[in-house]
Amino acid sequence: MDFKDSIKKFSERIIAYKDLLHNEEQTKDTLIKPFVDLMGFDCSNPLEVKSEVHCDVGIKKGEKVDYCILNDGEPIILIECKRCGENLSTHYNQLFRYFSVSEAKFAILTNGITYQFFTDLVKPNIMDKEPFIEIDFTNIEDWQIDAIQKFRRSVFDAECIWNSARKRKDMEELTTKLKNTIKSELDAPSDDLTSFFIEKVCDKELSQELFVHFSDVVKRYIVDLTASKPAVITTRSNNIDNHRKSSTTYSGKDYSQYAINGKGCYGKCPLPKEVVKEYLKHHNILSVKQLQDVFSDDLQGSSLGVIRAKIEDKNIKRYYKIEDNQVGIIYICKDWYPWTITNFISYVNSNIEGITITKIE
């Protein structure tokens, strides 16, 4: 059996046992130790895996990390374990402290289902705030299997893993900047962009007057083109509202009120927040990513997205903050237009069982 098949079999094990585990020790024995063994490290060999390793920090004494994985006697990975399904976000600081006093280059925070892999990409020997890989083993993807395969004992190379993580982080940051730049250019085209298009159609230098004239033409056309483009909702919904209104044609306030399953009275902005809260009551959701898979960013119709785990201070007024026992703190966007809320309602009514949104006449 190759590694990919072994991981998928391990994933099936998690799905079968996760609802039967009620404390941290059960989670360790049933899910986490088998994962460590699967990676080629022998949990019964103290030369490879040490348990309950002291990680005293300053005046804090008696603190212990659950497992420390060794390679040639040197610590390489710390693993902090929590009860199956427990919210991991509240335990970051604990692992952060352990990492700061350890020689290990990597740290894993896990509840037996979700595994968060950390290192020190931002500052040397300081654990990053964000994991460079986060894996839900009940829904693991092939690229994630390829990523964790590098942690196997037989091929473990700390520098190689760190460089791969660095490259992934750089690519994610570059992609975010690129998306933001494209959106910014489409919302308000710059002189550089308009010059680019003018040079494509003009084979001679233009007078300042003509250049200004054509610049205005290009900018207006780009804005009109993007404003009139229909909203694109994920293919999960077969009932897409194809009559999204252009921001240049809509005017006035929208005072529509909606009920959820015949109860409540919500305007368009708080409606998605209440829908998400209702959804969480009836579904075993353990991560923000799982919620984002259900409520796609495309539903919101802009780069803000529907659900976020963290937001910048400058955007705090554009989100509702809610706290769930399983997922932790999440933020729900409150910026909705009549056409985007129509798409959201259509998607929920067509795709989410147990939730029906109706307009209050």
Image (tube, rainbow, N blue to C red):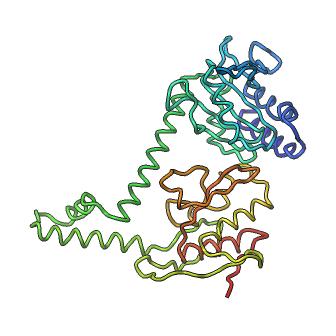
| Front in this rendered view, residue 25 or 166 | 25
Residue 104, compared with residue 327, is above or below; it is: above
**Which residue occupies 58% across, 49% down?**
310
Q: Look at the image and tell me in which quarter the C terminus lies.
A: bottom right
**Horizontal side, residue 2 vs residue 307: left or right:** right
**Horizontal side, residue 110 vs residue 305: left or right:** right
**Which residue occupies 20% across, 70% down?**
214
Furthest toward the front, the residue is 59
| Front in this rendered view, residue 121 or 194 | 121
Query: x, y percentage for residue 105?
Result: 60, 23
Residue 178, compared with residue 133, is above or below; it is: below
Residue 49, compared with residue 162, is above or below; it is: above
Q: Look at the image and tell me in which quarter the N terminus lies.
A: top right
Quadrant in the rendering for residue 216: bottom left
| Front in this rendered view, residue 154 or 304 | 304
Quadrant in the rendering for residue 127: top right
Residue 198, compared with residue 356, is above or below; it is: above
Query: x, y percentage for residue 297?
Result: 57, 61
**Which residue occupies 79% across, 61% down?**
281
Query: x, y percentage for residue 138?
Result: 76, 46
Query: x, y percentage for residue 329?
Result: 67, 51
Image label count: 0
